[in-house]
Image (spheres, helix red, strand yellow):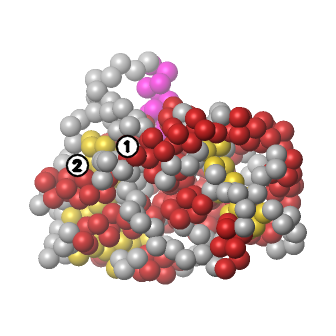
Amino acid sequence: MKKIAMFTMGTRGDVQPYIILSRALMKSGFDVTLGSHPCWRSLIESYGVHFEPVGPDIDIEAEAAAIRGRSRNAVLSMIKCMNFIMKIIRDSSKEVYEFCKGSDLIVVTHSKMGAVEAGVLGIPTVDVTLQTEMIPEKDKPVSFKDRIIGKMIGKQIDKPFNKIRRQYGLGLVKTGDELRSDKLNLIPISKYVIERSPYWEEKNILTGYWYDEEPEYTPDSDLSRFIESGEKPVILALGAMSFEDRSDKAKLDMFVNAFQKTGCRAVIQGFQKTLRNYDLPDTMIACGSVPHSWLFGQGSFVIHHCGFGTTATSMIYGIPSIPVPHVLDQLGFAMQLEKTGAATTHINAKDLSEAALIRSIEEMKNTYPLKKQNAESISAKIRTEGGVDEAVKQIMEHIF
């Protein structure tokens, strides 16, 4: 049996796509190992995937929230979070190296974990890219300014991997592109959402989104009763952006007041510290760690931060969106949603207010039939692609 390993760091949204890929590879007869933070053991093993702990035993979501809480500047806090994760990746290299031994393939996730170690061991690799802006576009005309900015960003991203290379006595890479697989790069995004760049090499494949065909989840009785007791609620799911270092009543008030003034029932995910001493109206309920693949299907529309996971899930399951991007990559995903016609105009996090939320909710209500139709249309197209099966097919054709 061929052995495949992959490693990823970050919040649940950074782990979920690889759980789905792991399961699909296992169904095709591969022996798969997925490595990540020790805190994700129960999640990964609940899907029947072999797990290996990598890095320190920390609550990564709490740590990320604490880092964000120490800075009011969204860009600065994002950079600090990235540096924190990159340090864990660098310090975990020896563990990753040992887990890679004996593998027939390393799937290099968007975190690039395993790329250097696989190279040292002579193991073939396949890449996964979530942000298409990171894919090299050879021969594309680029302005001098954009070239300089690209090099500056690239150096920051590549620095941790050069430190890993030093551990193995390897020379430095000039760009992270040198760490990329020369065989295959899987892009788990629908061709109906983004167009393939004419400047990409052939190895870059848009597979379609990876998702569970029939999400298996049983909600608790309180959540079930709430959902069944009235019209479909709004789903508020800000993902990692709602993990809190400390209580933030003013921010939660903003959403609660907007829902009340627009007559919306709502399911609120996140804000756990604030909700400990917060009385929600009867028209709203809080939920904890509920899979988006199930939760989004219960709502009329979803307000989310446009991480890769929530963006994909909203389109896969055909629910309109109010995008509230907080950082640059989320803005890119928000714009993808807007182009499908299944979302309102996005609200930048810095412009988030009760009034802005009310305007967006009213925009959603006034145009809901069309937005719902567009959401269901893109969902139907996505489901024709068989994204994760296409990913497995590509791996088998290019590697095995």
Magenta stretch: includes residue 262: no
Mark 1 residue crowding within 10 angstroms, few (<14) / some (14–19) / many (20+): some
In-image side of 70 versus 97 (left or right): right
State the residue in front, 265 or 331: 265
Quadrant of the frame with the N terminus:
bottom left
The structure residue drawn at horizontal position 63% and vertical position 49%, both measured from the top left corner, is: 301
Residue 184 tag number: 2
In x, y percent, where is residue 227? 67, 66
Q: Tell me which amino acid carries mark 1.
A: Lys
Identify the residue under disc 1.
Answer: 381
Residue span colored magenta = 144-155
- Residue 285 occupies quadrant: bottom right
Kindly indicate the quadrant of the structure image that contains residue 53.
bottom left
Q: Position of residue 59 (x, y in %)?
A: 60, 74
Residue 118 occupies quadrant:
bottom left
How far apart marks 1 and 2 lie (CA) works out to 24 Å
- Note whether 245 is above or below 319 in the view shown: below
In the displayed structure image, the side of residue 113 where residue 217 appears, left or right: right
Front position in the image: 361 or 349: 361
Q: Secondary structure at mark 2?
A: loop
Q: Residue at x 76, y 57 (%)?
A: 265
Residue located 11% across and 61% down the image? 400
Q: Neighbour class for label 2 at 10 Å: few (<14), some, many (≥20)?
A: many
- Tags 1 and 2 touching, CB below 8 Å: no
Q: Is residue 8 left or right of residue 332?
A: left
> Is residue 369 something one can see in this rendering?
yes
Foreground residue among 225 and 249? 225
- Residue 132: x percent and y percent? 40, 39
Q: Secondary structure at mark 1?
A: helix
Q: Amino acid at mark 2?
A: Leu
Q: Nearer the viewer, residue 104 or 250?
A: 250
